Amino acid sequence: MFRKTILTAASGILLFAASVSALHAEPKGKDAPVTVFVSPLTFAFTHFVFLTDQLEDEAKKIGGVTIVKADGQLSAPKQIADIEAAIVQGVDGIILAPVEADALAPVVKQAIAAGITVVTVDRPVNGVPEVLANVAADNFKGAESQGEAVVKDFPNGAKVVNLQGIPGDKTANDRSGGVHKVLDAAGGKYTFVSEQAANFSRDKGLAVTENILTGLSEVPDVIVAGNDDMALGAAQAVEARGLKGKIKIYGYDGSEDALKAVKDGSLAGTVDQFPGQQGRVAIRTLVDFIREGKKPATSDVLVDPVAITPANLEQAERVGLIN
C-alpha cells in the first residue's frame, strides 16, 4: 500500500499519490497490524461517545487494531488539522463523522491519495466517491418513525414545533424531511406552527424553545427535535413554564439521557439509530478491507432506526445503561 509520510513531498510524487485510490490498495494481510484514526463530530454529544466506545470495543475483539482518536469539537478546521496530522503519521485507515460535508472533502481526498482507506460514519462527506463506505442510520426512515409515533399519540391531529439541526446538514435535512413526509401526508390535521434550527445543541434547544413558546399564541401539542440534546433542552423550557405533560416531546438518537427521560415521562419518545452498531460495523468494514481487500456489498451501509416509546423501551440499544 502506497504511503506518503511527508505532505510536502516532490510534486511528481504528489501527483502519483493523487492517482492512487484506497479502493485499489494492496491488502496488508489477514493478521497485519492496523492503525485507525477516528474523528467523531464531537464528544460533547453522548451519541458519539457511545459510538466510539463500541467501535473501540469491537477493535479489541478483532485484535491487532490500534485506535487513535481526536475530538472533532464541532469544528471543521479542527478535524482538517487532525486528519492532516494522521496522514503525516501514516495511519492505515480513517473513520470520520464530518462536521461539514463539503469542508472536509478536500482533506479526505488527500488522505485517500496517500493510500489511506476512509470510512465515514453517521454522515457522509460530499463529492468523494472513493470513500470505502458510509455507515449510518437511515435518518429519513428514522424520522418517518418519529412522525408515526406522533400520529399514534395524536390521531386527531396536532400543532407541531419542529426543532431542526445544523442548517444545510444532510442529517438535519433528512430528519426534518422524514417527519414532514409522514405528517404532511395526513393532511391539514398536523400543522407546523414553528420550525427553527437549534444546531443539535441542548442549550440552543432550550433557548429556541423558550423563544418559540413566548411567541406562540397557543401552546403547541408536540415538539419534534432532530436529536435528543435539542429535545432535552426543549423539555427544560417546557417544564420551566409549567407545561410538562401538556406538550409531548420527541427526540432522536436513543441517548442514555433521553431513555431516562422517556422512562420518567419528560420525553414521549426518541429514535434509536443504534450508534454502537454503526461503530462496530464501521471498524469491521474498514479492517476487513485493509487486511483482506474485502469490499462491502454497497458503499451506503444503512442501519434502520426504531422509534422508542415507553411501550418498547427495552428495545433500545442503551437501555442497559439506565436499568
Image: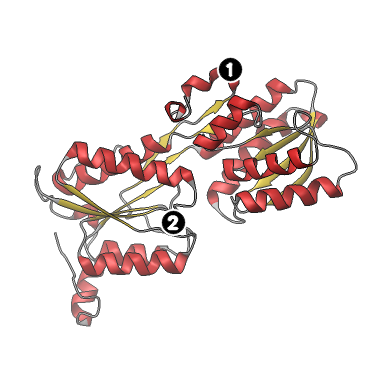
In the picture as drawn, the residue positioned furthest to the right comes out as 217
Tag shown at residue 12: none
Q: Answer above or below: position of 247 versus 88.
A: above
Q: Is residue 181 visible?
A: yes
Mark 1 or mark 2: whose residue is earlier in sequence = 2
Q: Residue at x 74, y 47 (%)?
A: 209
Q: Position of residue 90 (x, y in %)?
A: 20, 64
> Is residue 223 or residue 53 the one in the foreground?
53
Please tell me whether mark 1 sits on a helix, a strand or a loop: helix
In this picture, residue 77 sits left or right of residue 226: left
Q: Residues within 10 Å of mark 2 (few under 14, many from 20)?
A: many
Q: Residues within 10 Å of mark 1 (few under 14, many from 20)?
A: few
Identify residue type, mark 2: Pro
Q: Position of residue 315 (x, y in %)?
A: 47, 22
> Is residue 90 or residue 264 the one in the foreground?
264
Please tell me whether mark 2 sits on a helix, a strand or a loop: loop
Q: Position of residue 248 (x, y in %)?
A: 72, 31
Q: CA distance from mark 1 to mark 2?
A: 34 Å
What residue did someone put label 1 on? 311
> Is residue 86 or residue 256 the one in the foreground?
256
Q: Quadrant of residue 158?
A: top right
Q: Comparing marks 1 and 2, which lies closer to the viewer?
A: 1
Q: Residue at x 59, y 28 (%)?
A: 145
In this picture, residue 187 sits left or right of residue 202: right
Q: Are marks 1 and 2 in contact (CB under 8 Å)?
A: no
What residue did someone put label 2 on? 98
Q: Residue at x 44, y 30 (%)?
A: 321
In this picture, residue 205 sits left or right of residue 42: right
Identify residue type, mark 1: Ala
